[in-house]
Amino acid sequence: MKDNKKVIYWLLTGCLLIFLMVIVGGITRLTNSGLSISNYKLISGTIPPLNQQEWEEAFELYKQYPEYQKLHYHFNLDDFKSIYFWEWIHRVIGRLIGVVFLLPFLYFLIRKQLSRPMIKKAIILLGMGAFQGFLGWYMVKSGLVDMPWVSHYRLAMHLTTAFITFAYTLWVALDLIYPERKKIEKSFRNLIRLGMGVLLIQIIWGAFVAGLDAGLIHNFWPMMAEGKLIHETVYTEETPLWRNFIEGKSGVQFVHRYLAYIVVLVIGYIWYISRKLNLTDPQKNGINFLLFMVFVQFILGIFTLINAVPVWLGVLHQVGAFMLLTGMTFTLHRFSK
């Protein structure tokens, strides 16, 4: 018998750290702090500037890049320190996640506490973590060339990969927590898979909204403007409609708005159908949590929009997305074999 309890705690600790990292990443984005550190030093970068000279050197490096030259040219050293903190803590948590995943993995491997399938899953997790770190730097690089902001495509890749890594880590932990399987209705399982797919698409468009600052316009609900369900800038003649949906601020916000209704409807339908099935308590609890969380997240989205994305509401909305993904992952796991 493998000592799964320690492995479960390890995986859930990883989930908690990924959750924390995404939240800090959201604050970093909302406070425009993400381009404050323009180099990447794996070991020495863990230590922030410790004296006046080191702070001035870091500030001088920041001045060489577009964000300072085009946006923050009025910053003094104290202003720089305030944005440096969030990007630094975000990177430190990323390094901590690497240590927390790698060292216990090696320990469990040496102590032969991992089954062969579990070893394969752990290696996948390590690979996903390394890829996530690469995507973080790939994203930052896009804001160090000509324009003082990162590519919203790269931001979406970075954020979505973090969500998927979290979901897979949780899934592996659930494999150990619930080794038993219950005979399930395939059509209902496919419905939950559909819900997961729609939710992931909504998360991607949420990242597009964040990357383009598209939440700072059309701050009305349910209309996009007074008396208009669709703002005319969604379908400008100068740009193809499909491009507006992925690159235009109005088009991206439009997709994110109306995908939210679809997410609510799909989860509501999952709950409605589940009432006719003979379910276990974990299955019922998962679906009930999904229904509760989707309405909480929907309301958070509305208030975040109409208040033009204050930092605290933007962070809460991101927490809501994480909780919704957690509920969807748990529920899908309980209906998988």
Image (spheres, grey):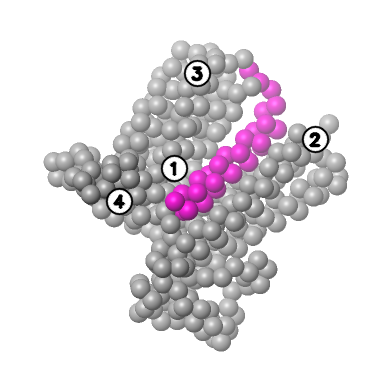
Amino acid at pointer 1: Ile
Amino acid at pointer 4: Lys
* Residue that mark 4 sits on: 249
Q: Is residue 74 above or below residue 116?
A: below
Mark earlier in primary sequence (3, 2): 2
Tag shown at residue 188: 3
The answer to which of 154 and 262 lies nearer the viewer is: 154
**Is residue 115 shown left or right of residue 198?**
right
Q: Which residues are magenta?
A: 153-182
Q: Is residue 273 magenta?
A: no
The answer to which of 306 and 165 lies nearer the viewer is: 165
Tag shown at residue 115: 2
Under tag 3, what secondary structure?
helix
Marks 4 and 2: which is nearer the front? 4
Q: Residues within 10 Å of mark 4 (few under 14, many from 20)?
A: many
The extreme left residue here reads 227
Q: For marks 4 and 2, give the CA distance.
A: 48 Å
**Is residue 32 shown left or right of residue 141?**
left
Mark earlier in primary sequence (1, 4): 1
